[in-house]
Image (cartoon, rainbow, N blue to C red):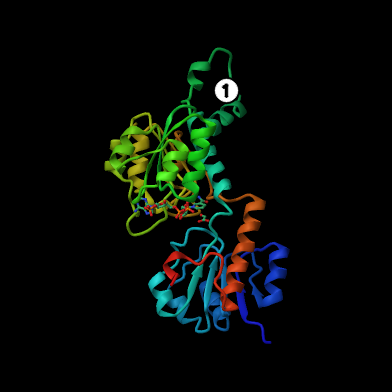
């Protein structure tokens, strides 16, 4: 039987490429640079499947890909999908939840600990030869253990953070979702709160919602002003859930104490971005799931999603909006 053609624009582990090649005729982009838009449209013309990362799936791409049946994203977030356009073109979307939860939760804790204890700033302090006897006071940070964390978006990753917080660090856990999660409340002693209440009550505010029309700029100037002046704001969701100019202002004028960020409105962060000038922000290059083991698992899951759809089977993880 003729194998369906697929286009892959990510570097994939050999085992994943072999699995794809068993079931599909694979056209893979092997250049280091991102595939240019025009070239992408050309390569997608014969493709029934497209395996990618955060590439925007919009009307013009879909028009260029008349045979496309599935876009399989190697990510759990799928805000790069234009869901309505995909539905119009009868293209389904899949993603890679669960396999990355623990790895992303580790990174959230790295941001919490790193910001509270000023790890990157003080590493630089030692490297610069500024470490002198008796200067302890200028090195003080804030405690993470037994502090209060407020999780906005208590989903799969949010729960992995809550478990670490409650059972590892003795922290009080507050959370905010659109719906309550009684099991999570029981497991982590978590308190459900409306957003404003959570912002005022938490020492660490952790953003872990998907980016949607509802969560776009959910945290802005008003919300920063509701937080404690000692609060540390962590964003591992998407940059656009936060009003970035308002965050910069809050960090500059002491409205909040510090921030730890893995995601930004523009990625990669431009070299002249004002966040780069602030000492009280810890910046990471969107590496929440970036361990070899987890990225390999995500890639294999994305491959299985794609092959299942092309074989007419239900994939392990269809994006909820495409479920019938
Ligand atoms: N930095 C990184 O590298 C990574 C970032 N991410 C980001 O993390 C996000 C979360 O992933 P995951 O935990 O798997 O997703 P889940 O869907 O499991 O959890 C999302 C949570 O957000 C809540 N939520 C959704 N909309 C709103 C809203 N309007 N207001 C308040 N709460 C809301 C949901 O609860 P309810 O429906 O009840 O509101 C749900 O509990 C991803 O979408 C992605 O953007 C993920 C992986 C890596
Ligand atoms: O940001 C990463 C994801 O998996 O979503």
Residue extending farthest to the left is 222
- Who's the residue at 55% across and 79% down the image? 44
User: Is 252 rendered above or below residue 75?
Assistant: above
154 sits to left or right of 127: left
Q: Position of residue 294 (x, y in %)?
A: 63, 53
Mark 1 within 8 Å of ligand 1, using the beta carbon: no
Q: Position of residue 304 (x, y in %)?
A: 62, 68
Q: Quadrant of the N terminus?
A: bottom right
- Who's the residue at 53% across and 74% down the image? 70
Q: Position of residue 291 (x, y in %)?
A: 63, 49
Is residue 283 in view?
Answer: no
Occupied quadrant, residue 22? bottom right
Q: Position of residue 98 (x, y in %)?
A: 55, 54
Is residue 302 in view?
Answer: yes
Q: Which residue is mark 1?
A: 130
Occupied quadrant, residue 13? bottom right
Q: Secondary structure at mark 1?
A: loop
- Who's the residue at 48% across and 30% down the image? 116
Identify which residue, 311 or 52, lies in the foreground. Answer: 311
User: Is 320 rendered above or below residue 253?
Assistant: below
Q: Crowding near pointer 1: few (<14 within 10 Å), some, many (20+)?
A: few
User: Is 54 rendered above or below residue 165?
Assistant: below
298 sits to left or right of 263: right
């Amino acid at each position: 039987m003729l194998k369906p053609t697929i286009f892959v624009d990510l570097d994939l582990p050999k085992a994943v490429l072999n699995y794809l090649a068993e079931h599909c005729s694979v056209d893979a982009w092997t250049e280091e640079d991102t595939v240019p838009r025009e070239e992408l449209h050309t390569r997608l013309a014969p493709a029934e499947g497209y395996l990618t990362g955060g590439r925007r799936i919009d009307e013009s791409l879909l028009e260029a890909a008349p045979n496309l049946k599935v876009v399989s994203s190697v990510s759990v977030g799928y805000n790069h999908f234009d869901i309505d356009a995909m539905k119009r073109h009868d293209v389904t979307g899949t993603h890679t939840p669960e396999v990355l939860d623990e790895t992303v939760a580790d990174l959230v804790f790295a941001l919490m600990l790193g910001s509270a204890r000023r790890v990157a700033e003080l590493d630089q302090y030692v490297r610069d030869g500024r470490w002198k006897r008796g200067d302890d006071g200028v090195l003080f940070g804030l405690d993470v253990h037994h502090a209060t964390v407020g999780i906005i978006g208590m989903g799969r990753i949010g729960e992995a953070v809550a478990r670490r917080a409650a059972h590892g660090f003795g922290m009080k856990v507050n959370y905010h979702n659109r719906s309550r999660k009684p099991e999570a409340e029981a497991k982590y002693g978590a308190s459900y709160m409306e957003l404003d209440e959570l912002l005022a009550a938490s020492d660490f505010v952790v953003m872990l919602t998907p980016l949607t029309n509802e969560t776009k700029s959910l945290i802005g100037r008003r919300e920063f002003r509701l937080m404690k002046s000692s609060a540390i704001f962590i964003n591992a969701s998407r940059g656009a859930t936060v009003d970035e100019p308002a965050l910069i202002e809050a960090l500059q004028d002491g409205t909040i104490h510090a921030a730890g960020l893995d995601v930004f409105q523009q990625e990669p962060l431009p070299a002249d971005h004002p966040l780069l000038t602030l000492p009280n922000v810890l910046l990471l290059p969107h590496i929440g799931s970036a361990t070899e083991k987890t990225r390999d698992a995500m890639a294999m899951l994305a491959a299985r999603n794609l092959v299942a759809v092309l074989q007419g089977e239900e994939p392990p993880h269809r994006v909820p909006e495409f479920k019938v």
